[in-house]
Amino acid sequence: MFDQRIAALEYVRQNKEQSLKLLETFLSIPSISTEPANQPDMQRAAYWVAAQLSGLGMQNVEIFPTARHPVVYAEWLGAHPRTAGAGGAPTVLIYGHYDVQPADPLDRWQTGPFEPTVRGESLYARGASDMKGQVVAVMKAVEAIVKSGDLPVNLKWLIEGEEEIGSPSLEAFIAEHKNLLACDFALNPDAGMIGPEDPTITYALRGLAYFELRVFGPASDLHSGIYGGVVHNPANALAELIAGMHDAEGRVTLPGFYDKVRPLSKEERAELARLPTDEKHFLEQTGAPALYGEAGFTPAERAGARPTLDVNGMLSGFTGAGSKTVIPAWAMAKISMRLVPDQDPADVAKQFYAYLEARASKDIRWEVTEMHGGTPSISDRNNAGVRAMAATLESVWGKQPYFRREGGSIPVVAQMQRVLGIESVVAGFGLPNDNVHAPNERLHLPTWYMGIEAFIHFFINLGS
Amino acid sequence: MFDQRIAALEYVRQNKEQSLKLLETFLSIPSISTEPANQPDMQRAAYWVAAQLSGLGMQNVEIFPTARHPVVYAEWLGAHPRTAGAGGAPTVLIYGHYDVQPADPLDRWQTGPFEPTVRGESLYARGASDMKGQVVAVMKAVEAIVKSGDLPVNLKWLIEGEEEIGSPSLEAFIAEHKNLLACDFALNPDAGMIGPEDPTITYALRGLAYFELRVFGPASDLHSGIYGGVVHNPANALAELIAGMHDAEGRVTLPGFYDKVRPLSKEERAELARLPTDEKHFLEQTGAPALYGEAGFTPAERAGARPTLDVNGMLSGFTGAGSKTVIPAWAMAKISMRLVPDQDPADVAKQFYAYLEARASKDIRWEVTEMHGGTPSISDRNNAGVRAMAATLESVWGKQPYFRREGGSIPVVAQMQRVLGIESVVAGFGLPNDNVHAPNERLHLPTWYMGIEAFIHFFINLGS
């Protein structure tokens, strides 16, 4: 194995330019899962993934249709899978997603979101970090190993197209294909590192509940002079409802919101306190004038281990240049909650309705659309995959990895726990300032190349 | 004079179709004063007005440029103006504006806002009621009188192009042209009737203070999973600021906001209570599920005689279809206050800043743009013009007019009081359900034709 490891590492070092070019072709496909207009691009991205996996020598490459966007599956099982009780090579299920977030506001991008561009040490494009770059890193690691000999582990690939809309089709897909997806554990590189010098394994993920709230008042826009003072302005009413969703301590006021939140243990708080993500870190990363959040918790705890509520978008009335003296007929806000174990998105939806029923006044009407949800998760840190990844990261970066709770949501981790009974190794090579979900998303290329090498070590370590 | 009155009335009755066609040509000009893109249309509308006034035999027709949009002036002084202490014909200054509000949301219009269309008894177009229809009604009345003999009064015309953006250039223009504009009183048809059977004279108008408030948080949009819980979301922060601008009793909380509000006298409250604008009226006109407003006042008092605060527009983050899990970098609201005597827009701006300084937290930044303001006014109901108009309305509708306080703002009324020392007769023929400032603005044509006849009576009565 030693020769293969050396050869594989040498191969990726010789082929950096080709790796970058391959990623750029993937990034040029605007596979925005939430936009109906990008439906053909979603198909194109799925075919692109299938073509790459075929090119790596994977077998049974198949594109499974779902209600929305297809799942790409592939496998290579030539390394003598483990049987019950016996030794042999493990089977790793590689999870990824080929869809990306919308790119607006477009005018804030320095270069087109789907025109990948290298500036300085980074590659700029929507999906560069989240997570086409991570998917291509695994592909390139596998390619390097295959070019240098046989794969020492069995691989299965599950690359979906709905992660950025909450993976609505995935749980049913997993349940229907339990045997196909049977494995020892999953590798999920959809969460990144704390910093370029800080190798990181994510052991807990927040869930999500996402709603669109519309408030209706008068039948039509009204003249604010003639009618100001007799109707409840829907924009004001919406603002009042949103303001009431937090108390003065930054706590969410939805009834029962914290009931199922698992308290942080002393040990976990001590471990989170060791993370380099202190107040200064978050101030630098966000550029906010000051931090904010739930009283009684540190920033790292608030961002990873406590539930939150945020407005993601808001629209009402006249928003053009200049002034228009109107009472708008309606107002809209997109509102989402990040959830932690053991909150459940369905419970939170009920709490959201209960809040609105209790707080909305009778002089307006409201409507809620449930957009998507995801269950939070927390993983066993002692499974073989996590141990192999920890050893790998230590050998590549020369220091023990951080274990952290991640604020983002990867619903598939909880789904795989629940349906397949497997843990995930959640470790990718994005960085906190990659501007994911924001304009000028980017990928730090030196870290990305180290990530490809880390995946090579990981697979070869697993097979040793 | 009797013969001239009969002849003039007969003339307008014979020429209804031509009157409508003329109005339609005016309405087809998209003279939106707040939109830079409509600058050429503003010029075109000013020329259109000048051409009509020339056609009526007016003299010294002139287009005065201002910092934004030109003022059209014209006069006819052949009826022997009054001199100090002596008799003679009065000089009436006719005020109007040729600009209109923006037309969005465009998709809510049944027919194009600048494609005037008759449906049922109404003419639909932006500006039909506010106030191109009113300006053309005066023009048609003057035309009918001129066609039937000599004008019995002296006329001056001041038709501006900035009313819908708060008349920012007008006060300076009036101050610079005091002699040119010298007159006995002004006729201002920019406020309408309570109902088609309810002739109305408006004796008080609310003022306006209009602001754009922007709240800034993180340097760029952030992933709501990674950063939710550590920064103050600007959309949530804006909602909290807006919510705090009213207390539980519907009162505005800006510090000192009510200090200069002139209390309603017993007599005035009794008179306002006689208006047919009761709760049922406002529910029908607005289509709101229930009314809302400051505790302790009737709907008619709240809409006309009490100050208010409304959000006119609101924008933040992702507002497209679907979901995007983002903490927006900024949030914006357009917020305006309707003012009553003796509030002052400059004071209110200071109160707005004071509120924000006291309430905005240090974890966000905010910026305010002052859009425009207008001083509220209250008029002497015993001047000659008001008495002539009251007699006119009674003769045309067969009932005494209502005297009401109007919720809308016409800054020029206060400006003329202050600079020229004259009162205005504020009486036009729009109706409350004309959808002014809203989609499907319309003009009730039977009322409009009666309005033209009323103006004929008014001018002939004044000269008798």
Image (tube, coloured by chain):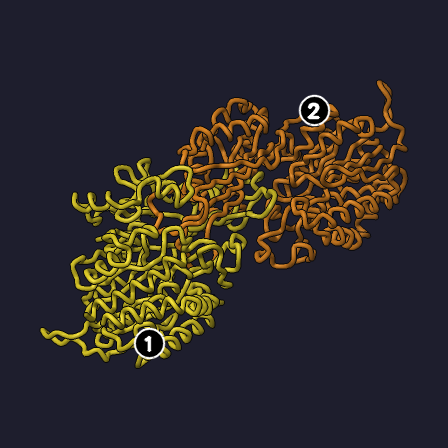
Chain colours: A yellow, B orange
Looking at the rendering, which quadrant does residue A449 occupy?
bottom left
The image shows residue A248, relative to residue A128, as above or below, that is above
SS of the residue under disc 2: helix
**Amino acid found under the numbered disc labelled 1:** Lys
Q: Taking the image as drawn, is residue A253 in sight? A: no
Q: Position of residue A443 (x, y in %)?
A: 41, 58
Neighbor class of circle 1 (other Cα within 10 Å; few <14, some 14-19, many 20+) is: some
Query: Of A373 and A149, which appears nearest the observer?
Result: A149
Side (left or right) of B140 relative to A326: right
SS of the residue under disc 1: helix
The image shows residue A94, relative to residue B288, as above or below, that is below
Q: Tell me what residue is drawn at x 44 percent, y 32 percent.
A: B295
Q: Tell me what residue is drawn at x 87 percent, y 39 percent.
A: B58
Mark 1, residue position: A147
Task: State the CA–CA distance, disc 1 to disc 2.
Answer: 88 Å
Q: Taking the image as drawn, is residue B167 in sight? A: yes
Mark 2, residue position: B418
Q: Position of residue B285 (x, y in %)?
A: 54, 46
Neighbor class of circle 2 (other Cα within 10 Å; few <14, some 14-19, many 20+) is: some
1 and 2 marks in contact (CB < 8 Å): no
Query: Of B392 and B311, which appears nearest the observer?
Result: B311
Q: Position of residue A331 (x, y in %)?
A: 47, 49
Q: Nearer the viewer, mark 1 or mark 2?
A: 1
Looking at the rendering, which quadrant does residue A292 occupy?
top left
**Amino acid found under the numbered disc labelled 2:** Arg
Query: Of A57 and A394, which appears nearest the observer?
Result: A394
**Which residue sits furthest top?**
B85
The image shows residue B440, relative to residue B397, as above or below, that is below
